[in-house]
Amino acid sequence: MDEVDNQQMPRVIVKEFLEREQGTRALLDDLERATLEGEHEAVRERIRTLADTDQNVFYAVALSLSGSKQFYGDVEAQLGVEAADVLRDLGETYPGLAEPFGLVRTEQTRERRNPVTELQATTTYHSEAEVPVVSYAPKSGAVELFDGQGSPEEVLQFASYLVQATTDSLDSALDREYSVNTEELSALIDRQEELESELGRLRNQIDELRRTPVGDE
């Protein structure tokens, strides 16, 4: 389903939500409790199920939780102030569900899966092997996707796989003469510059390590 930009679309999805408001609020109460108990993966799956089985209700809730003034305004214009107030109240009552609903909305509208929003990383040192150890855990919202540990070389190998997959995808788009939208291209340029900056730091660190090898006394 495309983003709700059709003039009549808010009317359709909100009417269905209003018809099922009581049951939907009961579901949201359960999801909120599960979120507070740390059951983030289960919450994500239940939201996905709602999106798959009752798409209109899902979008009504997701857009309400996003706090979109345009969405509230469209609802008010099409269905009246009372309906818009119900949705505003939804956003105010369940703010803790805004992120998981927003991420599933991204999955639904942009063909994503567990979009990474954060990387938690710490470092230790293995004195016997004479190498730093990086512990890392990519997260999608509150959901920890996996955790891993590796030496700097091993972590960079994983990163190189991702960069190669990215360049392969762009090669494929170019070969097929597919376009890449301006927003994505601009963000891609920003990521490239960030990578080049970090690679510059890496080159300097490697040069220093060459001059003073690890473990040299």
Image: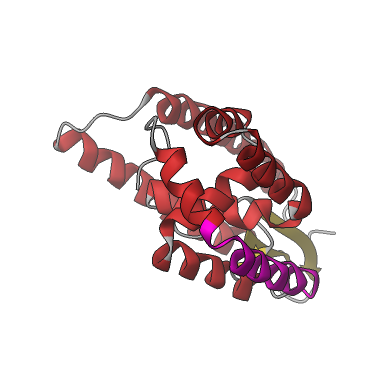
Residue visible at 58% across and 67% down in the picture? 44
Q: Main secondary structure of the magenta part?
A: helix
- Is 81 on the left-hand or right-hand side of 12? right
Q: In the displayed structure, does residue 189 sit left or right of residue 38?
A: left
Instruction: Locate residue 23: give its quadrant.
Output: bottom right
- From the viewer's perspective, is residue 180 above or below residue 141? above
Name which residue lies at 61% across and 76% down.
42
In the image, 114 versus 88, the foreground residue is 88
Residue 121 in picture, x, y percent from top left: 73, 58
Of 153 and 181, nearer the camera is: 181
| Numbered marks: total | 0
Q: Is residue 9 above or below residue 131?
A: above
Whether residue 151 is visible here, answered yes or no, is no
Q: Position of residue 4 (x, y in %)?
A: 43, 38
Quarter of the image for residue 216 reads bottom right
Q: Magenta residues?
A: 19-38
Q: Quadrant of the C terminus?
A: bottom right
Residue drawn at (46%, 39%) of the image: 10
Residue pushed farthest left?
176
> Is 25 rendered above or below residue 129?
above
Check residue 22 for magenta coloring.
Answer: yes
Question: As drawn, is 3 to the left or to the right of 131?
Answer: left
Give the quadrant of residue 83.
top right
Question: Can you say whether 188 is above or below 88 in the image?
Answer: above
Residue 150 in magenta? no
| Position in image of residue 151 (x %, y %) | 64, 65
Query: Tell me, what colour scheme is on the image?
Result: secondary structure
Task: Mark yes or no: residue 52 visible.
Answer: yes
* Residue at (45% x, 61% y) in the render: 51
